[in-house]
């Protein structure tokens, strides 16, 4: 009987451990941004004993028990926020040293465990697509291009005939020394060089028609016009029109903070001249293309230029810096105008008043009796009228910290004559 009880106890302990375990959830955050980590189970709000958030199982970031104020690790004071409602943890302004495994342990009758493996990354560096060489023949054109970043590059060859373009070997890719991915690929005659990691991306584009244009039966120019933009806190809707001389296409795009999508997918139409008109989305670029079998032309708009939600994370800071740069000279001019106004006003009110009390030596006044100004309450014939006797002052002679040579001052003594 004791053996059966022991086996059951071991089984229950194993079951509790199994219920309390949790796999790590990978989270990637751009350096300088915030991250919000939630407890997986929302029903742990009742009957808990404690909630503890740890980093790498050694640094206790938050310790909380019902009825008490949360205790925050001193190194993270002001950088973490804890919700007593759902036990979520928000860490602000993450740096590379904040990377690691964040664990939430919620203890009641069993222990609930939530783990996040947070990786803090820098934004990727800019990328440049360069056309190294162009060779043409009567029916084809070959381009050799290089996709470059600070610490890596990829070469690729593009071949175009009178109808289509193709990339030898397909898409080329490479992992840079910083751990990001570098790609060069072809989409509808657009050569795209892309540099990205889990938190940011940047790209450069070249059009094959700029280097391999057949001049027979050239299509007319095309224009991509943004008709309307509607923004909300987390999304942006764009309505665009792709127009040529005799035809047009309208399309709508929706962007959030991560991706953009085109309603209904790529839009296309055959124009009256027999060419094809297309509007489509490639990696955040809205492309309006007009082409036939031998020639094509394009116009492009970048969604990040139209939708603040879809722009690079640093862009809001750049806008603030630009506003400050504009406002500083305006503030300086305003201060100068106000100062000039008060200076001129003072000169008009006191034009002849000039005072310089620094290092002033006053003349020794003659001994004389000076009567006080007439006072209507005092009879001048009254013998008790007060007079002032002026004498020589022999006290300290310092003015504003400068020692003066025996400066003379007037000392007034009032004597009452009865």
Image (cartoon, rainbow, N blue to C red):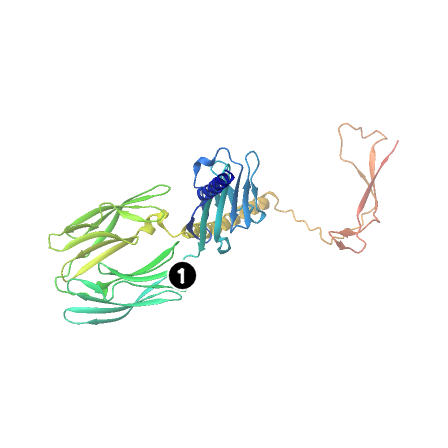
Position in image of residue 91 (x %, y %): 49, 47
Q: Nearer the viewer, residue 109 or 342?
A: 109
Please, is residue 165 above or below residue 256 in the view?
Answer: below
Position in image of residue 27 (x %, y %): 42, 50
Label 1 Cα neighbours within 10 Å, binned few <14 / some 14-19 / many ≥20: few
What's the residue at 87%, 33% (across, down)?
Answer: 417
Residue 326 seen from this side: no
In the rendered image, which quarter is residue 387 located in? top right
Position in image of residue 186 (x %, y %): 25, 61
Please, is residue 216 above or below residue 200 in the view?
Answer: below
Residue 182 seen from this side: yes
Please, is residue 373 above or below residue 115 in the view?
Answer: above
Q: Nearer the viewer, residue 38 or 128?
A: 38
What's the residue at 81%, 44% (across, down)?
Answer: 411
Is residue 246 toward the left or the right of residue 224 in the image?
Answer: left
Q: Number of labelled discs?
A: 1
Q: Nearer the viewer, residue 149 or 386?
A: 149
Q: Nearer the viewer, residue 81 or 271?
A: 81
Quadrant containing the C terminus is: top right
* Location of mark 1 (residue): 179
- Determine the secondary structure under disc 1: loop
Position in image of residue 78 (x %, y %): 54, 45
Is residue 102 toward the left or the right of residue 171 in the image?
Answer: right
Is residue 49 toward the left or the right of residue 195 in the image?
Answer: right
In the rendered image, which quarter is residue 348 located in? top right
What's the residue at 81%, 54% (across, down)?
Answer: 406
Residue sticking out furthest to the front? 1
């Amino acid at each position: 009987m004791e053996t059966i009880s022991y086996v059951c106890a071991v089984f229950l302990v194993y079951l509790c451990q199994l219920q309390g375990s949790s796999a790590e959830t990978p989270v990637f955050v751009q350096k300088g941004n915030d991250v919000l980590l939630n407890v997986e189970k929302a029903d742990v709000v009742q009957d808990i004993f404690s909630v503890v958030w740890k980093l790498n199982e050694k640094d206790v970031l938050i310790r909380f028990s019902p009825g008490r104020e949360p205790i925050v690790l001193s190194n993270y004071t002001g950088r973490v926020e804890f919700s007593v409602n759902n036990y979520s943890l928000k860490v602000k302004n993450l740096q590379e040293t904040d990377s690691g495994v964040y664990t939430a342990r919620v203890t009641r009758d069993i222990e609930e465990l939530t783990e996040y493996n947070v990786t803090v990354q820098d934004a990727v560096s800019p990328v440049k697509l360069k056309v190294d060489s162009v060779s043409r023949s009567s029916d084809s054109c070959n381009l050799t291009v290089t996709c470059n970043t600070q610490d890596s590059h990829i070469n690729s060859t593009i071949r175009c005939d009178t109808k289509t373009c193709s990339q030898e070997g397909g898409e080329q890719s490479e992992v840079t020394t910083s751990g990001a991915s570098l790609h060069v690929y072809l989409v509808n005659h657009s050569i795209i060089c892309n540099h990205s990691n889990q938190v940011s991306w940047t790209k450069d584009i070249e059009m094959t028609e700029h280097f391999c244009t057949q001049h027979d039966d050239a299509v007319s120019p095309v224009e991509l016009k943004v008709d309307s933009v509607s923004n909300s806190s987390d999304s942006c809707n764009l309505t665009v029109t792709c127009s040529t001389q005799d035809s047009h296409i309208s399309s709508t795009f929706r962007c959030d903070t991560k991706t953009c999508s085109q309603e209904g997918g790529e839009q296309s139409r055959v124009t009256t001249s027999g060419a094809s008109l297309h509007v489509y989305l490639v990696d955040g670029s809205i492309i309006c293309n007009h082409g036939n079998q031998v020639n094509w032309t394009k116009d492009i708009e970048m969604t990040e230029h139209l939708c603040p939600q879809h722009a690079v994370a640093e862009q809001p800071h750049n806008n603030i810096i630009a506003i400050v740069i504009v406002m500083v000279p305006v503030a300086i001019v305003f201060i100068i105008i106000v100062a000039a106004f008060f200076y001129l006003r003072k000169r008009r009110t006191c034009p002849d008043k000039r005072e310089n009390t620094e290092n002033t030596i006053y003349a020794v006044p003659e001994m004389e009796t000076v009567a006080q100004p007439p006072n209507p309450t005092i009879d001048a014939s009254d013998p008790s009228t007060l007079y002032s006797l002026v004498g020589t002052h022999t006290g300290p002679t310092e003015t504003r910290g400068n020692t003066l040579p025996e400066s003379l001052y007037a000392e007034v003594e009032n004597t009452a004559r009865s």
